[in-house]
Amino acid sequence: MAKLPERISKAWDDRQGPIVLATVDEKGTPNAIYAACVSKYDEETSVIADNFFDKTRKNILSGSKGSVLFITSEDRSFQLNKGTITYHKEGALFEYMKEQNPDELPRNAAAALKVEEVYSGSERLL
């Protein structure tokens, strides 16, 4: 797994609005969702709360890799790409997700994306 470079870590901290999380099903059909309950667990892992996943949950559980797209307050876009996604209904990542998200949301599980590549536009940064 790759550690986020400082530039990307700062951009993540400056992101605006929801992220876009993309997965694929077993047939290769893409699925993309907006997710607002997302946080950086460490410099290698982003955690997305499964509050209302359906196809996304099925894709993750079938072994899909994922991609996260976000935009900063300066309108720069970044893509955390081709990362492995794991699904946690208990343990440290699950507890972290629950701490980061409002109690009124379902907080069903934590989807953890391990970053393998990072892009800004067509420029590969990692």
Image (tube, rainbow, N blue to C red):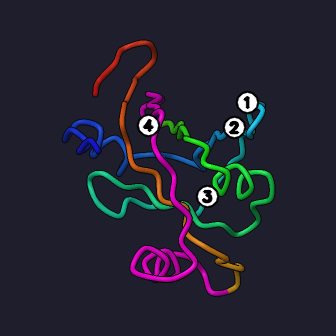
**Image position of 1 with respect to 120: above or below:** below
Of labels 3 and 1, the one closer to you: 1
Of labels 3 and 2, the one closer to you: 2
Q: Which residue lies most toward the left here?
A: 6
Q: Nearer the viewer, residue 68 or 71?
A: 68
Type of the residue with mark 1:
Gly
Question: In terms of sequence position, does the residue under pointer 3 or pointer 1 come before the other?
Answer: 1
Helix, strand, or loop for circle 3? loop
Residue 38 among those drawn in magenta: no
Q: Quadrant of the N terminus?
A: top left
Q: Residues within 10 Å of mark 1 (few under 14, many from 20)?
A: few
Of labels 4 and 3, the one closer to you: 4
Residue that numbered label 4 is attached to: 80
Instruction: Give the distance between the C-alpha atoms of the residues marked 2 and 1, in whole angstroms.
Output: 5 Å
Type of the residue with mark 4:
Leu
Of labels 1 and 4, the one closer to you: 1
Residue 28 image position (x, y, % from top left): 73, 30
Residue that numbered label 3 is attached to: 36
Instruction: Give the distance between the C-alpha atoms of the residues marked 4 and 3, in whole angstroms.
Output: 16 Å
**Image position of 96 with respect to 124: above or below:** below
Helix, strand, or loop for circle 1? loop
Q: Nearer the viewer, residue 116 or 37?
A: 116
Type of the residue with mark 2:
Val
Residue 109 image position (x, y, % from top left): 61, 73
Whether pointer 2 and pointer 1 mark residues with C-beta atoms closer than 8 Å, the reply is yes
Helix, strand, or loop for circle 4? strand
Residue 46 image position (x, y, % from top left): 42, 55
Residue range corresponding to the magenta coloring: 74-103
